[in-house]
Image (spheres, coloured by chain):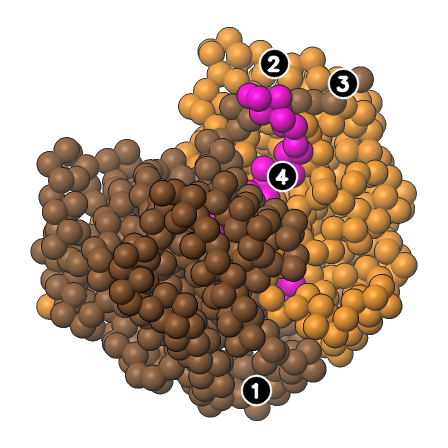
Chain colours: A orange, B brown
Amino acid sequence: MAPATLRRAQLHAGVSDPVLDTMNFLNEITHRYPRAVSFAPGRPYDGFFDVEEVFRHIRRYLDHLEERGATPAEIRDALFQYGPTGGQIRELVTRSLREDEDIDVPPEAVVVTVGCQEAIFLTLRALLAGPRDTLLVSSPCYVGITGAARLLGVEPTPVAEGPDGFRSARLEAAVAAEKARGRRPRAFYVVPDHSNPSGFTMPLRERHALLDLARREDFLILEDSPYRLVSPGRQLPTLKSLDHDRRVVHLGSYSKTLFPGARVGFAVADQVVVDEDGGQGLLADELVKIKSMVTVNTSPLSQAAVAGMLLAAGGRTSELNTDTAAYYGEAMRAILKRLDACFPEPERSALGVRWNEPDGGFFLTLDVPFPADNAALVRSAEDHGVIWTPMSYFYPQGGGERSLRLSVSYLTQADITEGTARLTRFITAEAARAR
Amino acid sequence: MAPATLRRAQLHAGVSDPVLDTMNFLNEITHRYPRAVSFAPGRPYDGFFDVEEVFRHIRRYLDHLEERGATPAEIRDALFQYGPTGGQIRELVTRSLREDEDIDVPPEAVVVTVGCQEAIFLTLRALLAGPRDTLLVSSPCYVGITGAARLLGVEPTPVAEGPDGFRSARLEAAVAAEKARGRRPRAFYVVPDHSNPSGFTMPLRERHALLDLARREDFLILEDSPYRLVSPGRQLPTLKSLDHDRRVVHLGSYSKTLFPGARVGFAVADQVVVDEDGGQGLLADELVKIKSMVTVNTSPLSQAAVAGMLLAAGGRTSELNTDTAAYYGEAMRAILKRLDACFPEPERSALGVRWNEPDGGFFLTLDVPFPADNAALVRSAEDHGVIWTPMSYFYPQGGGERSLRLSVSYLTQADITEGTARLTRFITAEAARAR
């Protein structure tokens, strides 16, 4: 009998999202050229991980439960059974938010999720309720926000970064344009610190301007900021810590600060939700309901490992990341220094090469004088042994055609030196080719 | 400043799903009457769990990776890093499916998910693509399928069980009715073995009839069968093992056979998907794409614990469940015996009390001669110290008003004896009240 055959056109449009195909293409290239130096992956460096630590972290959390009076049966259930849908480590998460980020919310405003991606997905599902509801995104943007929105049948409205990153005036214009065409802006998604993909950080005055705008125009801000605590030096305050009227849903990740394999993230959603009959709850309660139909709850085993790590550092995620932040900071300084050496002025300007200079995070943007498309990427990998991400992948509706995203999180200093040299040869060859 | 306030009516309708409120009500009752015997929870019995085992399971998987030639860095990454979105233990899952369930599929047809709930959610998202697409569900049904469908804006079409459970003739009529009104039935969801909530098992001839019907009418069968391997005695073949033309998406759970806290399940989706340009892939590939935008991947730490358990039993989940299956089997026999003793004939018929007699699983249905609603549940808990689940919770569009679901999975024999006595007093009092 012939097997059941489905036509892709009859599956949900989300599976035909071009973003997914481009990311697959990138993975394939990485696989095909294993000896290339790759500036593509946004994975955290794993040299600081130690397998034995996982066992100690889980044990530490179980000991903590015991110290707090849990019976052996309760400890067993905390590991083996279904747990509360909102999460069983919410107190520890809120303590870390208070001590690391000056974000002060009650545990019931937090939902522990399967990585930050689920926090994004749940929040979008709650807020994008009708056909007029609009999601605005700072553009270029993380593919996870575009992809999640498309799964819900929503095409995000991009708000282009300027040459120095986000500016609230552009958002204000975009919100006005959306309203003028009868749409209702519900939320604006942004990575304010060391953005993925561009590497820009939002200045303090823009943070205040954004919060003002959200209040005036009645939308929520979705703040996703996974690179803060793994960046060197003092960070600007989070939007959530500046948020006095609960305009910000803070989307949290432990993938960079603790480890990706836990798949533990969270949403801070302390917005008030009012029923028709006057009953009140928090947006977090609504996210919990949605979560119960998506993943039921986040693995208690994973939560135990995360909790053990938080406990190890007296509840401060930042304490755990002194070494990693220094490591990434050195990587970023190294690539900037190498780029300066490889493209000195006035040759740089003559060639038309430019980059921004992030002081943290994993990424920077490099503008080049030729189309940085898939064909160029193949030539780069094949002829020069260097891989990068076309910035155009991160524009939901076109843009970034002559820019690359370079990630430094997963490379050694030696890789960075060699990779930058290869990149220079590639860029020089392509520029000559384009002329 | 007044905090941002959202009106519930402006959030997605999925959060106002009455199913969510009823389940909350049930939790609240359970919390309010801690000394009541509760036939409500579908949680697995946890007396067989042992905290120390978790450490050994994870260690066993890491040793297995080492035996297969993984380097220390690879082993470290397998635990700490992001893993492949489709799952890193797919080989072990397919081996267990082959040995336990006679389901023979390649690893690439499997997607490892955050519990069975995510497998349900991803599958529905892939298949429910347009406004004409219909999901049929055997009714009464698990709330997770209704809730997931509603998050995607789809109201499932119920196909009522008969007095002995599912009958394909009823589904055939429902499919015809859907088509007659211009709708396109994409899938039919069913728990063929020891169903949640009713407890019925689909006979072998109905399994064959269902597969024939799916082929003739061109829809997929979503098979969710978490109670098979924790039920005593020989089980009927899964729909998937009888499926010669890939009509069945098998939705797998390890929550009952291994442990819920892992939050590891899977989908077996070996259907062929054809592109416009003739390219081919599997439905599993499409589920992987959707998963990348919902949870990115299933926790490698959780997968390691599950893999270690599978390895402990030579890859056979059934081996691990000899004791649990016997335990649940005794619980089911005990309640049936107690009900027989408490409601002897001819009093039983005179009173109008009836129940089915599942030979496995966690649940049975008890019909009573009065409305088994929330008000009756409160009286039952308050006056008689016994809790159960109104069967009406499991009917998406009405039904089950005079039936209770009784779960025996989480009770000791002593609880069952005492609980059944309390239930008898409650039913007798309510029947008198109704007269």
- Check chain identity for marks 3 and 1: say if they share one: yes
Expressed as whole percent of the image width and height from the top left, the position of residue A10 reads: 25, 44
Expressed as whole percent of the image width and height from the top left, the position of residue B307 reads: 53, 78
N-terminal of the pair, mark 4 or mark 2, is 2
Mark nearer the viewer, 3 or 2: 3
Q: Report the Cα–Cα distance between label 4 and label 3.
A: 20 Å
* Neighbours of disc 2 within 10 Å: few (<14), some (14-19), many (20+): few
Expressed as whole percent of the image width and height from the top left, the position of residue B280 reads: 26, 58
Residue identified by numbered label 1: B64
Mark nearer the viewer, 4 or 2: 4
> Which region of the structure is painted magenta?
A273-301
Mark nearer the viewer, 3 or 1: 3
Residue identified by numbered label 2: A173
Q: Report the Cα–Cα distance between label 4 and label 1.
A: 41 Å
Q: Report the Cα–Cα distance between label 3 and label 2.
A: 25 Å
Q: Amino acid at mark 1?
A: His
Q: Determine whether the residue tagged by mark 2 lies in a helix, strand or loop.
A: helix
Residue identified by numbered label 3: B2
